[in-house]
């Protein structure tokens, strides 16, 4: 078991180190997140009432889109420089290594989004309780986005115009998390208890954690077979 | 005669409606070096990827120590070292960090040992420089440093001489010969004119017709 | 059993069986479907609430039914593709996916047509319609991925993984969408419950559903035969078949 944990740790460390030394990859999804949120007051309405109502949804959609945008990087660099081949040939079960990579991806995109959320939430006039719940839903929800997204990223590896195809495949699968996430925030704004909905999101996370790494691992093997 | 490490039985591979190889059978015995030969596009890389377990779009069987490889996956992976065209070197990491990451899943090696290996490939003094600042040949050498610390009995090496200078090529040839003499097995593809005694050959790209 | 399984994997065997089966599937399917639809459209009594506009369910419900079943059939074929690497299962997925997409579209379209007199608008974000719309995109995703990967075997296995992921998600999507919109009509037709409709309505509906299933079977066979001929074009039996003009 220690060899598995050691290998997973090495994978995470490598990805974190690489990313920190190339901060633009890290920063771009965050900037994109802010920009998408900014489009709504400009494109729809800057009225406080509208923003307060739609704010939770806007931030969720923006977070979803920036995770989606960052997915292409999840395996592509590794695919291009051959790291992925070495990963697949490690003696440890591949799904654990994929899980480690996905975790690194979340630490580099999902977590910063959550950290940035309160700031943007204030800009769309959410109240304190809603902001807390929104951050909580994103904290549970963004790992799900990374996990499901890893399947799509693995399947589209090595294809031309992978980006649009990835979105086409993955957005439908994102819908349940989005619905639960925004629904929870809306319930919080109405002052109703949200424990049940949060538990539901937790269930989504557990399901994604247990199934997605296997699917991604299978997809990686298929994509590499093609290379 | 000792037991073969890896056996290929009736491998048949088609790609984009073209037969790369068919009815291909051979054994890799301990203490042998096999060179896969053939013109560009004849399926050398594909064959090595099949042997390494990366490509399974293939019919036929691959046996590891006499048993089906898919039941022996862990044992096979633990005992095989594959270095491909793209050797898995991260541009943002230093040679030492790259080696650490690449060997992490394969038994603990101290940094001392890894630095020694980097020295052995002529990268002394470059341990802390990000790989993107190194030349193509130096980057290959980082990957080849793995050979110096490898205890895997089977090496699968695709085009390892690419971008390596004459001195490096010579050292590498010597390394392969020592390895084979010690009882290791090596299967390589290369356009370099490899001179190793008792080299076996697998010829691809002939009899391509159905 | 194994021998049967093995035969099932042989494209030539399937081709011959399909040739014999297809006329039956077609004629029984057409008669059932037409009988159900004509009965439903022309003779069944009008609904006491919705008047005559409800009659579109005789098209809407069968296509919606089948649209979902086809995806589940594809998922079963996906398991077969991944576990046994059976070529025929992959041929099925490739042939069925566009048909499923068209059926989903048909269900959406008839739903919209139905929506106009019922709700006064072409589209409402009703749970069932929304789920259908998502299903349509699941189909599109699978088709697009299949087209994007040029290598036949990789393409088959990648699509199989995607379809399996999709089928795990379908119940979650349905549940979440229903949770999102609890204001929707209850499902028209449940196998486990006694239908709330009078027999004059549900018997033709059942006929139309069955008929459409058979017609799908026919169309799937036809498309699979075509796909097999393309893939096996180099083999002896296909060449022989082409020379005899397809009467073999």
Image: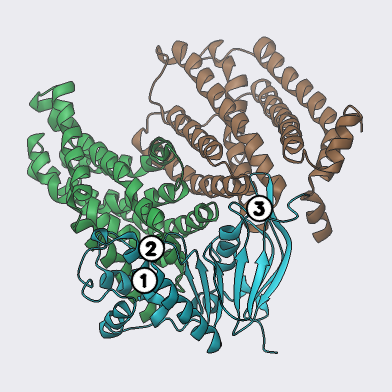
Return the chain for callout 1.
Answer: B
Q: Position of residue A180 (x, y in %)?
A: 31, 43
Residue pointed to by mark 3: C80
Which chain did the image draw in green? Answer: A
Residue neighbourhood size for the residue with mark 2, other residues' Cα within 10 Å, grouped as few (<14), some (14–19), many (≥20): many
Label 2 and label 3 in one chain? no
Q: Are marks 2 and 3 in contact (CB under 8 Å)?
A: no
The chain that appears brown in the image is: C
Q: Secondary structure at mark 3?
A: helix
Give the percent coordinates (x, y) of residue B29.
64, 82
For disc 2, the chain is: B
Q: Secondary structure at mark 2?
A: loop
Find out whether the residues at labels 1 and 2 contact each other: C-beta distance under 8 Å. Answer: yes
Q: Looking at the rendering, in which quadrant would you find the N terminus of chain A?
A: bottom left
Q: Position of residue A182 (x, y in %)?
A: 26, 40
Please say if B167 is above or below A124: below
Please determine whether, in this image, residue A28 is positioned above or below residue A90: above
Q: Which residue is mark 1?
A: B102
Chain for colour cyan: B
């Amino acid at each position: 078991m220690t060899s598995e944990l050691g290998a997973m740790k090495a994978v995470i460390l490598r990805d974190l180190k690489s990313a920190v030394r190339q901060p633009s990859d890290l920063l771009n999804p965050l900037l994109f997140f802010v920009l998408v949120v900014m489009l709504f007051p400009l494109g729809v309405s800057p009225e406080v009432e509208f923003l307060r109502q739609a704010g939770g949804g806007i931030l969720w959609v923006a977070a979803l889109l920036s995770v989606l945008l960052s997915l292409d990087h999840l395996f592509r660099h590794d695919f291009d420089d051959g790291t992925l081949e070495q990963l697949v040939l490690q003696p440890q079960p591949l799904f654990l290594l994929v899980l480690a990579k996905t975790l690194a991806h979340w630490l580099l995109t999902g977590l910063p989004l959550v950290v940035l959320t309160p700031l943007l939430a204030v800009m769309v006039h959410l109240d304190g309780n809603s902001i807390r719940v929104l951050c909580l839903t994103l904290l549970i929800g963004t790992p799900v986005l990374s996990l499901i997204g890893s399947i799509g990223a693995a399947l589209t590896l090595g294809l031309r115009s992978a980006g649009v195809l990835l979105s086409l495949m993955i957005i439908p699968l994102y819908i349940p998390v989005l619905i639960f996430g925004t629904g929870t925030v809306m319930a919080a704004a109405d002052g109703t208890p949200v424990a049940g909905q949060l538990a539901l999101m937790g269930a989504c996370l557990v399901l994604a954690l247990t199934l997605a790494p296997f699917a991604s691992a299978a997809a990686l093997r298929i994509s590499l077979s093609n290379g | 005669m000792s037991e073969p490490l890896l056996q290929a039985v009736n491998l048949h591979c088609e790609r984009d409606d073209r037969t790369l190889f068919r009815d291909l059978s051979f054994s890799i015995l301990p203490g042998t070096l096999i060179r896969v030969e053939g013109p560009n596009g004849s399926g050398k890389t594909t064959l090595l990827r099949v042997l390494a377990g990366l490509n399974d779009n293939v019919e036929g069987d691959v046996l590891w120590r006499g048993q089906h490889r898919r039941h022996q996956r862990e044992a096979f992976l633990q005992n095989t070292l594959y270095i491909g065209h793209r050797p898995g070197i991260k541009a943002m990491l230093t040679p030492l960090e790259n080696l650490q990451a690449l060997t992490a899943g394969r038994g603990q090696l101290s940094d001392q040992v890894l630095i020694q290996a980097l020295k052995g490939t002529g990268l002394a003094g470059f341990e802390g420089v990000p790989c993107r600042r190194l030349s193509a040949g130096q980057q290959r050498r980082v990957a080849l440093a793995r050979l110096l610390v490898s205890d895997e009995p089977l090496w699968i090496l695709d085009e390892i001489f690419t971008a390596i200078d004459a001195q490096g090529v010579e050292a590498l040839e010597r390394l392969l010969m020592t390895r084979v003499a010690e009882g290791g097995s090596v299967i390589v593809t290369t356009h370099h004119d490899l001179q190793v005694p008792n080299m076996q050959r697998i010829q691809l790209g002939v009899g391509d017709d159905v | 059993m194994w021998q049967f399984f093995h035969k099932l994997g042989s494209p030539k065997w399937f081709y011959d069986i399909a040739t014999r089966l297809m006329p039956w599937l077609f004629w029984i399917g057409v008669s059932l479907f037409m009988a159900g639809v004509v009965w439903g459209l022309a003779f069944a009594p009008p609904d006491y609430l919705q008047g005559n506009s409800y009659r579109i369910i005789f098209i809407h419900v069968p296509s919606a039914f089948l649209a979902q079943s086809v995806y589940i059939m594809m998922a079963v074929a996906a398991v077969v593709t991944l576990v046994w690497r059976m070529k025929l299962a992959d041929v099925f997925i490739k042939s069925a996916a566009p048909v499923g997409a068209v059926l989903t579209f048909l269900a959406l379209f008839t739903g919209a047509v139905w929506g106009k007199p019922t709700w006064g608008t072409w589209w409402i974000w009703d749970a069932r319609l929304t789920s259908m719309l998502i299903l349509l995109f699941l189909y599109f995703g699978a088709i697009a991925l299949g087209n994007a990967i040029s290598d036949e075997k990789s393409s088959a296995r990648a699509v199989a993984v995607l379809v399996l992921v999709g089928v795990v998600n379908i119940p979650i999507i349905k549940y979440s969408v229903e949770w999102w919109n609890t204001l929707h009509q209850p499902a028209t037709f449940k196998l486990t419950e006694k239908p709330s409709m009078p027999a004059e309505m549900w018997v033709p509906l059942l006929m139309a559903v069955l008929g459409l299933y058979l017609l799908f079977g026919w169309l799937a066979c036809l498309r699979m035969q075509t796909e097999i001929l393309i893939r096996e074009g180099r083999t002896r039996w296909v060449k022989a078949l082409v020379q005899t003009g397809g009467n073999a």
